[in-house]
Image (cartoon, rainbow, N blue to C red):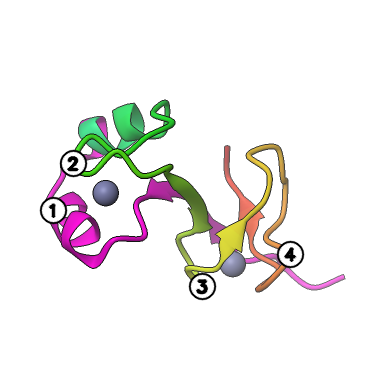
Amino acid sequence: MSEKKKAGVDKVCQETDCAEKMVGLTPEHKQLFKSFTYCPYCAEEMTLICNNCHEQLTSADFKFCPWCGSEFAD
Ligand SMILES: [Zn+2]
Ligand SMILES: [Zn+2]
């Protein structure tokens, strides 16, 4: 088996305006956002994504991205 790519899971809002606000966040804030269920900017439900391919994930418990095969480091 070949070496797996490493990736991380990000929690984002699908609204473009909110996603743009979240780009500038510090790693500490991004960590905090992962515990949120709803977007603090628009109250839409937050979405988990793979930060390698940016595809949506249906579970926070995935060990590998089902879309790009990256291993989630944590
Ligand atoms: Zn939002
Ligand atoms: Zn992926």
CB of mark 3 near ligand 2 (< 8 Å): yes
Question: Label 4 neighbourhood size at 10 Å, few (<14), some (14-19), many (20+)?
Answer: some
Disc 2 residue: CB within 8 Å of ligand 1? yes
Which residue was labeled with disc 3?
A: 53
Q: CA distance from mark 3 to mark 2?
A: 24 Å
Question: Quick check: can you spot residue 8?
Answer: no
How many angstroms separate mark 4 from mark 1 (CA)?
27 Å
Sequence order check, earlier mark of 2 and 4: 2
Say what secondary structure mark 3 lies in.
loop
Q: Position of residue 26 (x, y in %)?
A: 16, 40
Q: What span is in magenta? A: 1-28
Image position, residue 13 (x, y; %): 34, 52
Residue density around tag 1, few if under 14, some if 14–19, many if 20 or more, within 10 Å: few
Q: Is residue 63 magenta?
A: no
Residue at (48%, 49%) from the top-left corner?
47
Residue 66, quarter of picture: bottom right
Q: Is residue 18 magenta?
A: yes
Give the percent coordinates (x, y) of residue 29: 22, 33
Report the disc number at residue 41.
2
Identify residue for label 4.
66
Q: Amino acid at mark 4?
A: Pro
Using the numbered discs, state the Cα–Cα distance from disc 2 to disc 4 in whole angstroms: 29 Å
**x%, y% of residue 28?**
24, 30
Q: Residues within 10 Å of mark 2 (few under 14, many from 20)?
A: few
